[in-house]
Amino acid sequence: MLSYRHAFHAGNFADVLKHIVLLEVLAYLAQKEKPFCVIDTHAGAGKYSLDSDYALKTREFDTGISQLWQRDDLPPSVANYVDLQKRFNANGQFKHYAGSPLLIKQVLREKDKLHLFELHSTEVGLLKTTMKQDKRIRIEHADGLKNSLGLLPPTERRGLVLIDPSYEMKSDYADVVKTLIQMHKRFATGTYALWYPVIERGRNQALETAFKKSGMTNIQLFELGINADNSGRGMNASGMIIINPPWNLAATMQTVLPWLAGILGENGAGNFRVETLVPE
C-alpha cells in the first residue's frame, strides 16, 4: 500500500469519472446554506505535475483529461470539471492536475470542513504544501479507512466521505464494504462515494454482491470503460459506488457517461454502466 503513488495515474480516464461525480455531489451539498463536512480517506499529494517523471512514464493522462482539454462541446458537468482544472494551469498550458483535495477546496465555503487522510509519508508532505494553511482543512498522516470512523457523525450532520484506495491488496475490496457498513451505522444520512478499478471482473461482482447484502439502501453505481474487460491486462474500466446520492445524479450521468465513453473509448470500445445496486 505504501508503494502506491497516484502521480503515475493522475488525469487518466478513472480520474475523469471520479472527479466529475465528486463535483456533482459537492454541488448538491452546497445548494443548502447549512455547512457540510467532507472526509477524504486517501487524499494523495493533492496536485500532480504532468511533466514529472512519474506522469510521463505512463502518460495515463492521455486516456483522460488531455482528450477533453480543448474541446468546445463538453456537457455541463464535464465543462465544470475541466474549467476547475484550468484554474491550476496558466495561459492554457496543461502542466498540472488537481486531485480530489484541491478540487474539494474550491467548493468549500467559510463554514464547511475538510478532513484529509494520507498514509504515505512523502505524499502527506506534498499534500500539506499543496493545501497550505487553511482553518477549514485538517490533514492527518494516518490510515483514513481506520481513523475516519471516529469523525462520524460530523458536527455539521451533513457531508460526504470519499474513499479511494489503491486496491493493491485484494483484501481492500472486502475492507471497504466492512468500513462503509460501520460508517453508515454512525452516519446513516451521509453521502459515501467509493471509487473502484475494474481489473478482474470477478472481484467487482463480489464487491457489488457485498453491497447488495450489506443492509444499506439507496446505492447507485456509475462505471466508465475505455476497453472491454480483459483480465490481466490492467485497468480498462473504473467506477463509483454512491450511497445516498443526490436525487439528480443518475440522470446527469445517463447523459455524461455515454458521451465520455464515445470520446475516451479506444477504437470504439468505450462502455458505461448506470445502475441502482440497492433502491431506497
Image (spheres, rainbow, N blue to C red):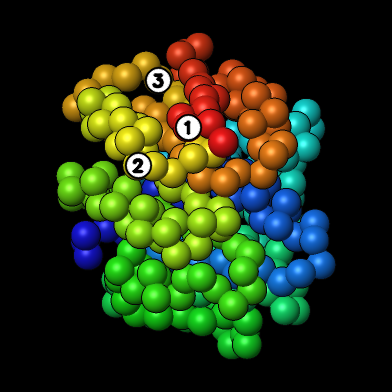
Label disc, if present, on residue 214 of the rendered structure? 2
Sequence-wise, which precedes: disc 3 or disc 1? 3
User: Where 62 falls versus 270 (above or below)?
Assistant: below
Secondary structure at badge 2 equals loop
At label 3, the amino acid type is Asn
How far apart marks 3 and 1 lie (CA) works out to 27 Å
- Please state which amino acid type lies under the numbered disc 2: Ser
Q: Quadrant of residue 120?
A: bottom left
Label 1 element class: strand
Query: For this view, does 76 lie left or right of residue 234?
Result: right
Marker disc for residue 278: 1
Distance, label 1 to label 2, CA atoms, is 10 Å
Secondary structure of residue under mark 3: loop
| Label annotation for residue 227 | 3
From the viewer's perspective, is 194 left or right of 132? left
The quarter of the picture where the N terminus appears is bottom left
Q: Mark 1: which amino acid?
A: Val
Q: Is residue 195 above or below residue 5?
A: above
Mark pair 2, 3: CA separation: 30 Å
Q: Looking at the image, which residue is at 63% across and 65% down?
A: 158
